[in-house]
Image: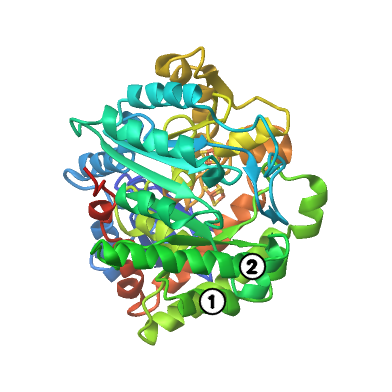
Amino acid sequence: MKKPIPEVHNQRLMPFRWRELDGRVLLTGDAGDYAWLERETFGDFLAGTLSKEHPAYADLERHNLIRGPHIEKKVMDRVGARSHHLFSGPNLHILILTLRCNQACVYCHASRKPKTSKGFDMDLETAARVLDVIFESPSPDLTIEFQGGEPALNFDVLRFIVEEGYRRNQGGERNLYFSLVSNLSTLNQEQIDFLVDNGVMVCTSIDGPADLHDRNRRFSKKSSYKEAIKKIRAFERTYKRRGLDKELAYVNALATVSRSALKKPREVVDAYVRMGHKVIHLRPLNPFGMGLKIWAREGYTAQEFVDFYLEALDYIIELNKQGEEIMEKLASLMLVRILTDEDSNYMDLRSPCGAGLGQLAYNYDGRVYTCDEGRMVGAMGDDLFCIGDVHQNGYADIIRHPGVRSMCVASCVECLPGCNECAYAPYCGVCPVYNYIMEGDLVARSPVNDRCRIQKGILDHLFRRLAEPGMEDLLRRWTESKDRSSVYRRIVP
Ligand code: SF4
Ligand code: SF4
């Protein structure tokens, strides 16, 4: 029988959380430091009987888990650095240019409208008001992300926003970036030239090999996979003609994991290797705005996703060992939280999360939401996450809306039951929109919901793998993302 964990009798301990994993104890500190102890040693550590000569003592000191001169100040400064985004205002602004789409994905959310529908496009007047609000944000960095529906179906308004955005930022006071999330299929060469010449980042979906992608992303009688690959190649040729560095200028892609992908983790990874992509982002399906019928057909349990993900992750690590340069994005975002004090600008692994504080989402009609996921709930007829309207409100009204405060309180992991004592709190984030959809409350009634199970499953595995000899060096490379800002600048006057 295991010895019970003794009571704490040591004034030298820094605040920490812990978790037993494979018979050992993982300790984590508020600034993301971590150390492993054998169970026996952990008991001595708590009881204050761990000798300074014990090799674990120096390790705990090195990881700021034992009080010492200046340690508290150092840890406080690092916690501040890890949360610096709280003091700068939202930098990500998601614009829904249209709800129309020319494809019909099997997991699409309820807001999609057919390509020929009328009345679901952002107009120029609304676009200009959206820009007014965006430029009122105090953030020195502004990323304007075009989403839909298929945002390229409203290309004239996209063009207006890019040109007007650069005009308003003529003094270059802000670091202004644009990004387009598109299935790429409607883009012609003139539009591709415009996007490349104006430094618009492009992100698309590739769900895996052709048969899987085409099954997920229905495109009348055509292959959505072939269309996407054709356009990715057209972008690559255009980047090359402009003399841009191919290591920095490329189309980003992410894979949404549907039920049909679950048995094919290696095939999905191989599809990215064949395309020559160095980053694969394996994204679980989310239930926002998705009807229950669709979820019943395409959804899966947390454990099914974790099994898929871990097999894919181990395979990617294996490919790395064989010299292939490819990383998984979700793991890389978590590793940034574990191994560095940097901010990966990922809204869902923050405490509080990015809703309102880091991002705002603007619907085609001018209504403003805490985030795009909140906007999707709005599309289902529930405007709980709506925090204003650009036709009536300025930035100050929007950011002071009680909805922003509620999201902030509901997503502080340090204060939430269950999360507050979880060893993964320094690296994790909760999602009030997810909780609301799944449980009808911004705060999870059961802290251990499916989203938590996925985060925990991935973090358990990352910590296990980090403990292997030589593995930290390999995985640390995934945290060293290249600065791509030089190619996402306007190259036309
Ligand atoms: S969501 Fe789950 S894994 Fe994340 S901090 Fe909370 S309890 Fe821990
Ligand atoms: S509410 Fe959820 S989706 Fe919205 S920013 Fe927060 S974590 Fe992300």
Quick check: is the Cβ at mark 2 less than 8 Å away from ligand 2?
A: no
Few, some or many residues within 10 Å of mark 1 (<14, 14–19, 20+):
some
- Residue at image position (57%, 79%) is 266
Report if residue 493 is visible in the image.
yes
Give the secondary structure at mark 2: helix
Residue drawn 43% across and 82% down?
A: 319
The answer to whether residue 246 is above or below residue 346 is: below
Where does the image place residue 264, in percent across and percent down from the top left? 64, 76
Residue 331, horizontal then vertical, whole percent = 45, 63
Question: What residue does disc 2 label?
Answer: 213
Q: Which quarter of the image is occupied by the C terminus?
A: top left
Q: Which quadrant does the N terminus fall into?
A: bottom right
Mark 2 nearby-residue class (10 Å; few <14, some 14–19, many ≥20)? many
Percent x, y of residue 254? 51, 61
Asked if the residue at tag 1 contacts the one at tag 2, i.e. Cβ–Cβ closer than 8 Å, the answer is: yes
Relative placement, left or right, of 76 versus 393 is left
Q: Earlier in the sequence, mark 2 or mark 1?
A: 2
Q: Cα distance, mark 2 to mark 1? A: 10 Å
Specify the farthest residue to the front: 190
Amino acid type of disc 1? Ala
- The residue lying toward the viewer, choosing from 443 and 419, is 443
Which disc is residue 271 wearing?
A: 1
Residue 1 showing in the rendered view: no
| Residue 387, placed above or below residue 362 | above
Amino acid type shown at disc 2: His
Measured as percent of width and height from the top left, residue 192 is found at 41, 55
